[in-house]
Image (cartoon, rainbow, N blue to C red):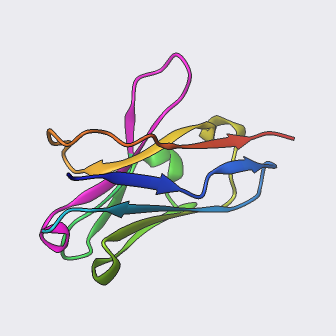
Amino acid sequence: QVQLVESGGGLVQPGGSLRLSCVASISIFRLIAMAWYRQAPGKQRELVAGITRGGNTNYVDSVKGRFTISRDNAKNTVYLQMNSLKPEDTAVYYCHTNPPSQLTWGQGTQVTVSS
């Protein structure tokens, strides 16, 4: 059974940093593009950052220069380094394929940016 398990969220003050991790039990992980998504209360889920199988990355404008997505194919893991966090980054963060496939979404990890 394919699973996506996110971790690393928490409560952080504005300007702080967090590193999210997602372990994907996908046998062909190294061959697929992955992404981090987030969903804030009352808002639709949005793509935050994506990474191709070759390591090319893309970001939503609001996080450019602050967030960095990376992957470790040997560990079937994708990371999201988040720096200079802002209150508007508060959301539940999920990883998934890019674009999203029929895989079940994981539980996500809550990121709360507040003083």
Please identify the residue farthest to the front as the structure is shown. Answer: 1
Q: Residue at x 19, y 43 (%)?
A: 103
Vertical order, 86 against 35 (above or below): above
Vertical order, 104 against 76 (above or below): above
Q: Is residue 115 left or right of residue 80?
A: right
The picture places residue 34, in percent across and down from the top left corner, at 26, 58
The picture places residue 113, in percent across and down from the top left corner, at 73, 42
Vertical order, 16 against 11 (above or below): below
Q: Is residue 45 magenta?
A: yes
Q: Is residue 102 left or right of residue 7?
A: left
Write the start and end of the magenta stretch as one range.
28-47
The picture places residue 56, in percent across and down from the top left corner, at 26, 71
Q: Residue at x 38, y 35 (%)?
A: 46
Q: Is residue 16 left or right of residue 44?
A: right
The picture places residue 39, in percent across and down from the top left corner, at 47, 31
Q: Is residue 107 magenta?
A: no
Please identify the residue farthest to the bottom as the structure is shown. Answer: 74
Quarter of the figure with the C terminus: top right
Please identify the residue farthest to the right as the structure is shown. Answer: 115
Q: Residue at x 20, y 62 (%)?
A: 26
Please identify the residue farthest to the top as the structure is shown. Answer: 42
Q: Nearer the viewer, residue 3 or 34?
A: 3
Q: Residue at x 18, y 74 (%)?
A: 30
